[in-house]
Image: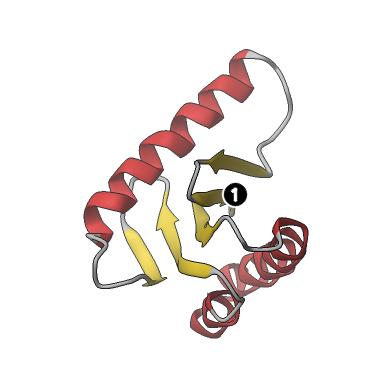
Amino acid sequence: MEELIKELARIEGVKGVAIISNEGLIVTSILPETIDADAVAGMCATNFRNGLTTVKVLNAGKIKHILIETDAEFIIFSSLGNSFLATISDRNTNLGYLRIKIDKAVKEIKVKMLEE
């Protein structure tokens, strides 16, 4: 899994990538030293769980991605089942390309998780 998140982290504009359990624990990450990984993981997990609840209440299927768009960054949460992938990038990142790469990584991470 480490190599898969390293590949995402090498995409131009990507600032950080992490696999976070739905309970808010870091499984693995590549994050800048300026980010408190544990605090961010907890907040990301809270946002992801809120998204799960919203989708359930709306009977809208299963979450694939949750996108948070700010004036400076994109934050994308991608479901992995009992965990999720969090990708942080600046606004200059090609979002379509990034989504394609995230989808590929999610598929490969899910396979790796089943192997473990």
| Residue drawn at point x = 23 percent, y = 57 percent | 38
- Residue at the bottom extreme? 3
Residue at horizontal 60 percent and vertical 40 percent from the top? 66
Report the front residue among 28 and 32.
32
* Residue 86 x/y as whole percent: 49, 56
Q: Residues within 10 Å of mark 1 (few under 14, many from 20)?
A: many
Report x, y in % for residue 47: 43, 35
Where in the figure is residue 20, as x and y percent of width and height? 41, 57
Q: Which residue is painted at 39% across and 43% down in the image?
A: 45
State whether residue 94 is above or below residue 40: below
Residue at the spot x=67%, y=70% of the render? 105
- Residue matched to label 1: 79
Q: Quadrant of residue 55?
A: top right
Name the kind of residue labelled 1 in the image. Ser
* Left or right of residue 69, residue 95 in this image: right
Q: Is residue 55 above or below residue 71?
A: above
